[in-house]
Amino acid sequence: MRYLDAGEVHRHLAYPGLVEALRAAHRDGGMPQTDVKVLSDSANEGNKFVSLISWASGDSIAVKMVGVFPGNAALKPPVPSVQGLVVLFDGKTGVPVASCDGAALTFRKTAADSALGADILARADAEVLLVAGAGGLAPHVIDAHTSVRPGIRKVFIWNRNPEKAQALATRYAGSGREVAAVAALEDALPQADIVSCVTMATEPLVRGALLKPGAHVDLIGAYMPEMREADDDTARRAGRIFVDTRSNSENSGDIAGPLAAGIIERKDIVADLFDLCSGRHPGRECADQITLYKNVGGGHLDMFTMQYLASRLEI
């Protein structure tokens, strides 16, 4: 069984190819059998350990074991907050085929998931990207979104810690785009064609009233019911909700909150990536529509990504 370290994962999973691989997997296949378990540390509930299993009958099995430890960033020296391992098995024999660094694969598949959603739902003439959050996933989100919308000319980065936002912006000096840290999220929201949130927020950051007509909102955090990245006005103005997968989507606060408040109903979750990539739903319906996409994630995406990685290396 071959093991691929983080460097190899990043090197072989360039965003244009990975986005297209995820598009093909959703267009040509169906949802595999999946299971997920989330455990919290009794001494520190912010620390999570997640196991995800996905099995496409007769094809592949993927198992991801990943820990999320937000406090790692404050360690001396700092340690990445996401740690883990992904293993791909032959779905016919159960033989292990390959394994790889789980954090690197998680970053790549998560960013590509949102970029695929943006490629289908965001306006083709999008020029301004706003990223809320400046952690390890943020640069991947910038790179993935700009790979599908190369017309983006300006990127705003906001973070509760302004120094982190500035440090990330500095990394893009000389990129050919204007990349700048912003101190006030409310000043950047009205300018953004695409808003992508990569945070651990428990109170909404995105104010729907400030969104420009035609904006695309990409919510990646808020994977638990008590977490929120966008307020009720965002869901109200969007009206129709898009998700990468319906499975477990209602466990996200950004879906559960508006449902509980009666702002949306289950029927308003109109399409997932299987619907969008296969053409069963057209996606954006007009230029002024605000599109809201919840990136839920799931073991099937790890499997699709791991399958693509293995195919790239002819494993």
Image (tube, rainbow, N blue to C red):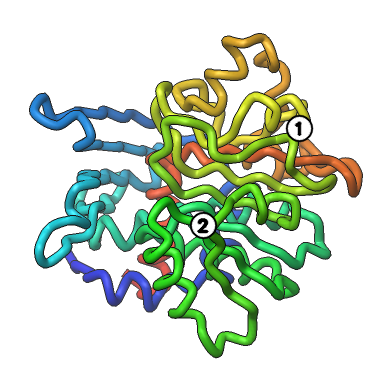
Q: What residue type is labelled 1?
A: Ala
Q: In this view, does 311 lie to the left or right of 53?
A: right
Count of numbered circles in the view: 2
Q: In which quarter of the image is residue 77?
A: bottom left
The image position of residue 72, as x and y in percent, is 17, 53
Asked whether disc 2 touches disc 1, contact meaning CB atoms under 8 Å apart, the reply is no
- What residue sits 71% from the left and 71% below the top? 152
Whole-percent x, y for residue 245 in the image: 55, 34
Up-down relation of residue 251 to residue 134 (above or below): above
Question: Closer to the camera: disc 2 or disc 1?
Answer: 2
Asked whether the viewer can see residue 30, the reply is no
> Which residue, given by chain and number where applicable, does mark 1 sit on?
238
Q: Which residue is drawn at 89% across and 45% down?
A: 288
Query: 26 or 271, which is in the foreground?
Result: 271
Quadrant of the image for the C terminus? bottom left
Q: What element carries label 2?
A: strand
- Residue at the location (57% across, 53% down)? 184
Q: Can residue 269 be seen in this view?
A: yes
Numbered badge on residue 68: none
Q: Residue at x 68, y 54 (%)?
A: 194
Q: Which amino acid does label 2 sit on?
A: Trp
Work out whether residue 26 or residue 285 is closer to the camera in this orientation and state it.
Answer: 285
Residue 263 placement, left or right of 257: right
Residue 237 x, y percent position in the rendering: 78, 30
Determine whether 66 is above or below 162 in the image.
above
Alpha-carbon neighbours of circle 2 within 10 Å: few (<14), some, or many (≥20)? many
Which mark is first along the chain, 1 or 2? 2
Where does label 2 land, which residue? Answer: 158
| Disc 1 secondary structure class | helix
